[in-house]
């Protein structure tokens, strides 16, 4: 964590050094706006909880008193995160190695949760990702892997949770971490397609599943410093802060606290919605009819 990249590109871009996420000690000590027993007695499943945003949320949920399950493919990473949370917070999450792309593994995960905990209150679909490439060059396998992970995998998790909640008559809450795809994203067409699918799936399920007392929402991060940054080339990383008018990268705590807002009673009247956490990225690229201020780079090439 916090590997130091070659700084030459960042100095040229005038950007501060990026972090690849917080250290475990930092996650344990980050100030939070929430009271410490907010999630006491609640069971929270976080996919991709072994790293990045999911790990930050696992720390926060455990600190707020929840019983946490983290799942992902790599057992060692999950164990390391579970050990760290136990050491710092005094509560060990259950690490489960599985792939959300395999429906049978998803079923086994939910069976395990109901055997061990007897309930589930919140599902956070955070596992996901992509690789950067021009769409015209996508291989069939590359396209399929991103759609399968982000759309199909997320759906298997949602359906498994909802079926158990219907059976138990308990209700439940789903938050899916997607991406800021409102204006599309060049070199990420596969993930835009998949995430748009999850957003509109969620809007639809919010209505279908309201009679089961299940809320379904999404959060859309902009550029967030995390271990996930390792899949991007250094010259791209050096420009990420330029994507939003705040001219900085967000951090995993920004996303974790937003997810908790939707999980907690603060979110009890919110369903079918998309909470964007992007420093204004979606609004960036404005036309300045009276000339662009220095802060935003002065005159554009067309003189405006
Ligand atoms: C581009 C978006 C820009 C966003 C801006 C910044 C915001 C940051 C957003 C983030 O999401 S950060 C979090 C990022 N974390 C990840 O993305 C991690 C997860 N990603 C992955 O695990 C992979 O990228 C994956 C392809 C989604 C899954 O890989 P996996 O190995 O499990 O899949 P397979 O089914 O085996 O398929 C691999 C297949 O995919 C193609 N491929 C993979 N990488 C590349 C690449 N760099 N370039 C081109 N093609 C790639 C390729 O066909 C692979 O098959 P093989 O060639 O290996 O046979
Ligand atoms: N960081 C950012 O700027 C942004 C992130 N996001 C999204 O936020 C989410 C978290 O990303 P972030 O924390 O940054 O990056 P990470 O790469 O750290 O997180 C991705 C997680 O997904 C898990 N994962 C990948 N494939 C599978 C699978 N088939 N089954 C189960 N788990 C899987 C990974 O664990 P393992 O490899 O062990 O399976 C990993 O823990 C992702 O959906 C990402 O696309 C969206 C916009 C911006």
Image (cartoon, grey):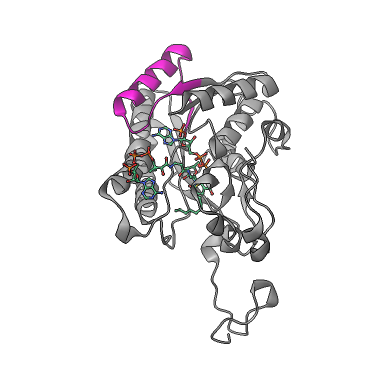
Total numbered circles: 0
Percent coordinates x, y for residue 98 in the rendering: 40, 25
Residue at the location (54% across, 21% down)?
Answer: 79
In the image: residue 23, left or right of residue 230? right
Q: Quadrant of the C terminus?
A: bottom right
Percent coordinates x, y for residue 171 in the rendering: 43, 28
The answer to whether residue 168 shows anywhere in this view is: no
The answer to whether residue 49 shows anywhere in this view is: yes
Q: Is 114 inside the magenta-drawn segment?
A: yes
First to last magenta residue range: 95-124
Q: Quadrant of residue 110?
A: top left
The residue furthest bottom is 303
Residue at the location (41% across, 62% down)?
Answer: 186
Question: Would you place residue 179 above or below residue 23 in this image?
Answer: below
The residue furthest left is 140
Question: Would you place residue 149 above or below residue 235 in this image?
Answer: above
Percent coordinates x, y for residue 9 in the rendering: 62, 60
Seen from the viewer's position, the closer of residues 199 and 297 is 297
Seen from the viewer's position, the closer of residues 254 and 52 is 52
Seen from the viewer's position, the closer of residues 281 and 21 is 21
Residue at the location (40% across, 48% down)?
Answer: 199
The residue furthest top is 115
Question: Would you place residue 220 above or below residue 281 in this image?
Answer: above
Q: Quadrant of residue 153?
A: top left
Seen from the viewer's position, the closer of residues 139 and 271 is 139
Q: Is 251 inside the magenta-drawn segment?
A: no
Q: Quadrant of the N terminus?
A: top right
Percent coordinates x, y for residue 45 in the rendering: 48, 27
Q: Ligand 1 is located in which of the four quadrants?
A: top left
């Amino acid at each position: 964590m916090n590997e130091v990249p070659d700084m030459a590109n960042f100095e040229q871009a005038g950007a501060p050094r990026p972090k690849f996420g917080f250290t475990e000690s930092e996650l344990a000590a980050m100030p939070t706006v929430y009271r410490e027993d907010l999630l006491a007695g609640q069971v929270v499943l976080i996919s991709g909880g072994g790293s990045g945003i999911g790990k930050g949320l696992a720390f926060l949920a455990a600190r707020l008193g929840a019983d946490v399950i983290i799942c992902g493919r790599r057992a060692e990473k999950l164990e390391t995160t579970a050990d760290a949370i136990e050491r710092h917070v005094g509560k060990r999450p259950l690490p489960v190695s599985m792939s959300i792309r395999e429906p049978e593994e998803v079923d086994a995960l939910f069976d395990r949760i109901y055997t061990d905990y007897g309930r589930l209150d919140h599902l956070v679909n955070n596992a996901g990702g992509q690789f950067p490439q021009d769409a015209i060059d996508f291989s069939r396998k590359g396209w399929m892997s991103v759609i399968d992970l982000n759309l199909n995998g997320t759906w298997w998790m949602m359906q498994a949770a909802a079926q158990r909640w219907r059976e138990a008559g308990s209700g439940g809450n789903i938050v899916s971490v997607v991406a800021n795809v409102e204006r599309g994203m060049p070199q990420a067409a596969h993930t835009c397609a998949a995430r748009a699918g999850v957003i509109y799936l969620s809007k639809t399920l919010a209505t279908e599943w309201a009679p089961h007392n299940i809320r379904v929402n999404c959060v859309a991060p902009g550029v967030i410093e995390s271990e996930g940054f390792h899949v991007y080339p250094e010259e791209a990383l050096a420009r990420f802060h330029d994507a939003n008018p705040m001219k900085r990268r967000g951090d995993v705590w920004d996303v974790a606290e937003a997810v908790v807002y939707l999980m907690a009673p603060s979110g009890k009247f919110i369903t079918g919605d998309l909470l964007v956490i992007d420093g204004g990225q979606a609004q960036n690229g404005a036309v300045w009819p009276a000339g662009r201020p220095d802060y935003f780079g002065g005159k554009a090439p067309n003189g405006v």
